Image (spheres, helix red, strand yellow):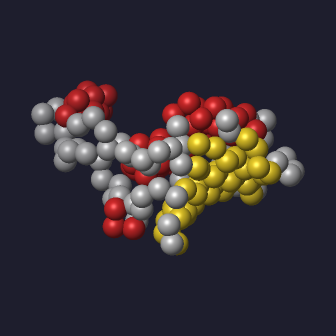
Amino acid sequence: MANDMSTAGADRAAFHFRAETGEVRAVLRRAVARFARQITAEDAGALELVLAEVLNNVVEHAYAHRPAGEIRLSLWRAPARLHCLVEDLGRALPGLSPPDDDLPGDGTPDRCPPDDCARTCACRVRDLAEGGWGWSLIRALTEDLGYERTGKANRLRFAVPLASP
């Protein structure tokens, strides 16, 4: 069961939980709810999307074919951003860095008229393979993305920019 490790102050939250999909869903709800009254609905949506991508990557890749390990999530609010730190003891990221932010496929709308944005975007989405969107979304919605591997520990840090302080 996920539990709050530290909830000192309204601007901080920390969670320690098992790397399981049900636990991730529970922590997502609690983490977003923790800051919901302090940030806009759009910022809460961005936070939820980024955390879902990051935490599910840990479950699906860092702990793939291993017993579920532990994840630590720390969040703290600054005036114009929400800082996040995700720590785990799973496998390291390939190349010891977050993957490039290129979307899967070449992303070119060659089969669609260039003057029809809605149709062009729909064609681009149809041409893309399933998967591979996660890191592009993470990079698009965050700032100061950084990763380090120290011993057996992974540390991914990033900040979600906020519309209003």
Q: Residue at x 68, y 39 (%)?
A: 2
Q: Residue at x 34, y 62 (%)?
A: 94
Above or below 69: residue 144: below
Q: Residue at x 35, y 58 (%)?
A: 99
- Residue 40 visible in rendering: no
Q: Position of residue 79 (x, y in %)?
A: 76, 56
Position of residue 135 in the picture relative to residue 4 (left or right):
left
- Quick one: quadrant of the N terminus? top right
- Residue 104 visible in rendering: yes
Q: Position of residue 67 (x, y in %)?
A: 47, 45
Position of residue 44 in the picture relative to residue 11 (left or right):
left
Query: Number of marks in the image?
Result: 0
Position of residue 59 in the picture relative to residue 9 (left or right):
left
Q: Position of residue 109 (x, y in %)?
A: 19, 39
Q: Position of residue 50 (x, y in %)?
A: 53, 44
Position of residue 10 in the picture relative to residue 162 (left or right):
right
Q: Residue at the far left: name it.
A: 111
Q: Residue at the far right: name it.
A: 9
Q: Quadrant of residue 87?
A: bottom right
Q: Residue at x 59, y 50 (%)?
A: 71
Return the residue nearer the eye: 62 or 105.
62
Q: Quadrant of residue 36?
A: top right
Above or below 98: residue 138: above
Q: Residue at the far bottom: name it.
A: 151
Return the residue nearer the eye: 12 or 46.
12
Return the residue nearer the eye: 55 or 91.
91
